[in-house]
């Protein structure tokens, strides 16, 4: 199959790697230094919808897979479907389940999906008044897309008020922070449940757990993700069925009733406090990063067949099969991430990792006319180890990560080790 993957991060590299390993011909737009190793990079930005559509038509692309959320918000699926090019992802209207925290929250409240208590606001003074009259601690969320950084977890009222002012008055996330949601802070174990959806059919993937805070011990600011492991280890078959019956199926059914039928990857981030059960933290309208890097390598079904069944609406006939090994992924970032990071540093040791480990490139590029790989952003690489146990996969990931070097590289030392 000739497949186009849209995006440029480690999630997209994992998709390209898997598709290529399973025998498909893969293009990636715009891609990175890693996707170029397994497919052909195309110099088209992921938000250049017209350019992507033109390329897909000219190259007779059989299937397109969208990685990041921004092109989904811009309506890439609507445009591809209008000319009958199979594409995996929700329409712009259905993507609101991620692109608007307020829409997702109202949807959950309407159909009884468990979520944190909270309110939405359009003015900073009203939000601050709420904080001063409501017991904390709180989580402050920008309503719109903010590259995974629009959620501020706070312990003190002063921190929450500062987050409100930054989002709504200082516009650090632009229009994404014009509206916000303030919720109670939930404490427990986080889990990511992702499924392929087409019509009323849902094929769940294996569960994973990710680490969003920048520093060891779940300290520091929220990030796009510092690492993950798969499987979660604590999601029993009964609890997985509960999530499907009480979260995924009701949401998909309601989206259809609202005239926004869902197709593509549906991601539910949940908190398990072990007392009150699961509550939904967020929905995403695409695969997670870094969860994809630890989920997809376990897949033994042919990925392009599952994706085509999703795009064309015959997913009810499909199942996903997985290997039994654990995967642990550790994200290596540039210094100061998630703040703006210095870039352009050479990366060494990529050829020194063991054959059963995998390195998925995120923010990387190659110097023109050379084979020198350099950093190009915040989350640079995800190093994935495998093993029969969590401890073995953890050791394997960190052993191979230590082979790789670049100036002022940062990473968490506790991925899959404590607190999960």
Image (tube, rainbow, N blue to C red):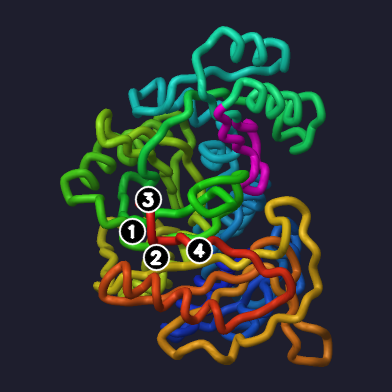
Residue 309 in the image: state x and y as whole percent. 38, 63
Dot 1: within a 10 Å radius of its alpha carbon, few (fewer than 14), some, or many (20 or more) residues? many
Mark 1 vs mark 4: in front: 4
Quadrant in which residue 252 is drawn = top left
Q: Looking at the image, which is closer to me, 296 or 88?
A: 296
Viewer-nearest residue: 219 or 95:
219
Q: Do the numbered discs 1 and 4 sit on residues whose CB atoms are within 8 Å?
A: no
Q: Which residue is mark 1?
A: 205
Q: Are marks 3 and 2 in contact (CB under 8 Å)?
A: no
Mark number, residue 295: 2
Q: Is residue 49 among what the camera can see?
A: no
Instruction: Determine the main secondary structure of the stretch shown in magenta.
Output: loop
Label 3, secondary structure: give it: loop
CB contact under 8 Å: marks 2 and 1: yes
Asked whether, in this view, residue 353 is left or right of residue 315, the answer is: right
Q: Is residue 274 above or below residue 118?
A: below
Mark 3 or 1, closer to the camera:
3
Q: Which mark sits nearer the N-terminus, 1 or 4?
A: 1
Residue 147 is covered by the magenta coloring: yes
Judging by the rendered image, the residue that carries numbered circle 3 is 419
Distance from disc 1 to disc 4, alpha carbons, whole Å, reads: 27 Å
Q: Give the alpha-carbon distance from disc 4 to disc 3, as whole Å.
A: 13 Å
Residue stretch rendered in magenta on the structure: 141-155
Q: Residue at x 31, y 76 (%)?
A: 387
Kindly identify the residue that appears in the image at 56 percent across and 37 percent down.
96
Q: Compared with residue 278, is residue 371 higher up or lower down, i.e. above or below?
A: below
Residue beneath disc 4: 413
Which marked residue is nearer to the observer: mark 3 or mark 2? 3
Disc 2 is placed on an element classified as helix
**Looking at the image, is mark 2 or mark 4 earlier in the sequence?**
2
Discs 3, 1 touching: Cβ within 8 Å: no
Residue ID at (56%, 23%)? 182
């Amino acid at each position: 199959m000739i497949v186009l993957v849209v995006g440029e991060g480690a999630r997209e590299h994992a998709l390209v790697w898997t598709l290529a390993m399973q025998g498909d011909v893969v293009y990636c737009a715009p891609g990175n230094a890693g996707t170029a190793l397994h497919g052909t990079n195309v110099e088209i930005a992921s938000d250049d919808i017209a350019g992507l559509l033109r390329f897909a038509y000219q190259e007779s692309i059989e299937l397109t897979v969208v990685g990041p959320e921004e092109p989904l918000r811009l309506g890439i699926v609507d445009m591809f479907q209008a000319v009958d090019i199979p594409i995996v992802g929700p329409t712009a209207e259905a993507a609101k389940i991620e692109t608007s925290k307020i829409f997702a929250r109202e949807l959950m409240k309407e159909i009884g999906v468990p979520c944190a208590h909270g309110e939405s606001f359009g003015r900073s003074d009203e939000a601050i008044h709420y904080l001063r009259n409501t017991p904390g601690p709180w989580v402050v969320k920008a309503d719109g897309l903010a590259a995974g950084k629009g959620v501020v977890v706070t312990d003190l009222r002063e921190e929450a008020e500062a987050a409100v002012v930054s989002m709504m008055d200082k516009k650090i996330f632009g229009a994404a922070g014009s509206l916000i949601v303030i919720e109670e802070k939930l404490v427990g174990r986080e889990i990511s449940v992702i499924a392929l959806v087409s019509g009323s059919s849902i094929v769940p993937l294996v569960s994973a757990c990710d680490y969003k805070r920048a520093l060891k011990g779940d300290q520091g600011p929220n990030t796009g993700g510092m690492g993950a492991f798969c499987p979660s280890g604590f999601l029993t078959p009964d609890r997985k069925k509960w999530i499907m019956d009480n979260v995924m199926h009701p949401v998909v059914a309601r989206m259809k009733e609202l005239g926004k039928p869902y197709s593509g990857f549906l991601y539910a981030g949940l908190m398990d406090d072990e007392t009150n059960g699961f509550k939904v933290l967020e929905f995403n309208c695409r695969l997670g990063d870094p969860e994809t890097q630890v989920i997809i390598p376990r897949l033994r079904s042919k990925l392009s067949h599952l994706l085509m069944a999703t795009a064309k609406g015959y997913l009810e006939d499909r199942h996903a099969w997985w290997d039994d090994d654990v995967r642990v992924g550790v994200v290596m970032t540039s210094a100061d991430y998630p703040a703006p990071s210095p870039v352009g540093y050479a990366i060494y040791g990529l050829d020194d990792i063991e054959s059963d480990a995998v390195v998925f490139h995120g923010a990387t590029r190659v110097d023109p006319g050379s084979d020198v790989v350099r950093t190009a952003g915040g989350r640079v690489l995800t190093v994935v180890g495998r093993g029969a146990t969590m401890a073995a996969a953890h050791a394997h990931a960190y052993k191979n990560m230590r082979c790789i070097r670049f100036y002022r590289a940062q990473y968490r030392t506790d991925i899959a080790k404590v607190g999960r």
